[in-house]
Image: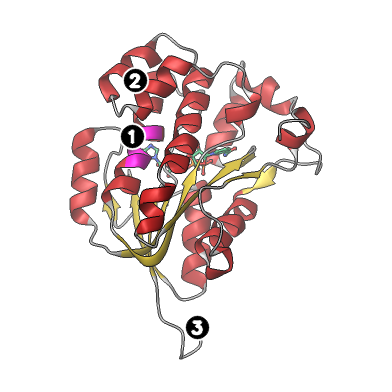
């Protein structure tokens, strides 16, 4: 960092692994401060799958922050589908709605390209998420397949981002999301090892040729946090090697 630059402070959840670790690494490498939250190996160890764990984590982190990146999440192969709902949606929204950002700050939420390529998105579950009704979302999730809960949680995250542009804009803070395709991480590896999801992931056509890396997604997150993205607000940016464009070429 050059002497005239100011050190910024970012909050990253899910920072012990995968994308969260890659984002935290990029921010630290340029001299910024990163406060991390995860189940383990973080500044704040907390379970974001429960309201009590989220409240504990929010009480332990003190903003305001220059940027917020709630990465903690579970994949569709996790057997406890209600937990997928709690961590992926409520675990992210607690921070997006509960953390103070400085004027000029930005948040990047983590959606997924499953939002558009998985046909099992469940409208009732998406509504329960957006109604902020965790008991209803958990109950509905118990009756749905893991990929349906996963994709629905990521649709709700993307819509929640878009719904916040006016209020966030009036405060001088930006909110965007990335919608990654498969990238190498322990979460993806669990999916690849799963007898149901593994073959489906392997069969995805990826125009760039290969499954991506957490670093490739983290680079886009860093851009969205930066002043170079000052006019990018409410965007859902696909970082998926072209999968969404290949499968839905007319969807614009
Ligand atoms: N890997 C992919 O292919 C892929 C694709 C699209 C979207 N995503 C999303 O990217 C985000 C990061 O995923 P990843 O692949 O880096 O996964 P990962 O498993 O490597 O990392 C996820 C982190 O979240 C933490 N976490 C899980 N449950 C938690 C809880 N209850 N409380 C606190 N922390 C918890 C884990 O401990 C872990 O450190 C997730 O939101 C995921 O849905 C991943």
Above or below 96: residue 79? above
Label tally = 3
**Residue plotted at (40% across, 60% down):** 173
Q: Which residue is mark 2?
A: 137
Q: Which residue is mark 1?
A: 90
Above or below 165: residue 154? above
* Secondary structure that dominates the magenta span: helix
Disc 1 to disc 2, C-alpha distance? 10 Å
197 or 131: nearer the viewer = 131
Q: Which residue is mark 3?
A: 1
Q: Position of residue 51 (x, y in %)?
A: 22, 34
Q: Specify whether 219 is left or right of 102.
A: right
What kind of element bears circle 2? helix
What kind of element bears circle 1? helix
Say whether mark 1 is within 8 Å of ligand 1. Answer: no
The answer to whether marks 1 and 3 mark residues whose Cβ atoms lie closer than 8 Å is no
**2 vs 3, front mark:** 2
Image quarter where the C terminus lies is top right
Q: Position of residue 37 (x, y in %)?
A: 33, 51
Q: Quadrant of residue 92?
A: top left
102 or 81: nearer the viewer = 102
Q: Specify whether 196 is left or right of 157.
A: right
What kind of element bears circle 3? loop
Disc 1 to disc 3, C-alpha distance? 35 Å
Q: Residues within 10 Å of mark 3 (few under 14, many from 20)?
A: few
Extent of the magenta region = 89-93
**Residue plotted at (61% across, 41% down):** 180
Q: Residues within 10 Å of mark 1 (few under 14, many from 20)?
A: many
The answer to whether marks 2 and 3 mark residues whose Cβ atoms lie closer than 8 Å is no
């Amino acid at each position: 960092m050059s002497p005239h630059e100011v050190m910024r402070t970012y909050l990253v959840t899910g920072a012990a692994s995968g994308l969260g670790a890659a984002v935290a690494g990029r921010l630290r490498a340029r001299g910024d401060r990163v406060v991390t939250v995860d189940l383990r190996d973080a500044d704040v160890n907390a379970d974001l799958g429960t309201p009590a764990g989220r409240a504990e984590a929010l009480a332990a982190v003190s903003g305001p922050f220059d940027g917020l990146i709630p990465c903690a999440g579970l994949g569709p192969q996790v057997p406890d589908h209600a937990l997928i709902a709690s961590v992926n949606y409520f675990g992210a929204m607690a921070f997006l709605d509960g953390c103070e950002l400085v004027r000029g700050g930005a948040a990047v939420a983590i959606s997924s390209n499953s939002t558009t390529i998985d046909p099992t998105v469940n409208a009732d579950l998406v509504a329960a998420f957006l109604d902020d009704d965790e008991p209803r979302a958990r109950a509905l999730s118990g009756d749905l397949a893991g990929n349906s809960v996963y994709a629905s949680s990521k649709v709700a995250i993307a819509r929640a981002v878009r719904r916040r542009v006016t209020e966030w804009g009036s405060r001088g803070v930006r909110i965007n999301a990335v919608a990654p395709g498969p990238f190498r991480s322990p979460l993806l590896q669990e999916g690849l090892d799963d007898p149901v999801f593994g073959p489906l992931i392997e069969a995805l056509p990826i125009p760039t040729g290969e499954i991506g890396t957490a670093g490739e997604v983290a680079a886009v997150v860093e851009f969205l946090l930066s002043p170079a993205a000052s006019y990018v607000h409410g965007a859902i940016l696909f970082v998926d090697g072209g999968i969404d464009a290949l499968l839905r070429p007319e969807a614009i």
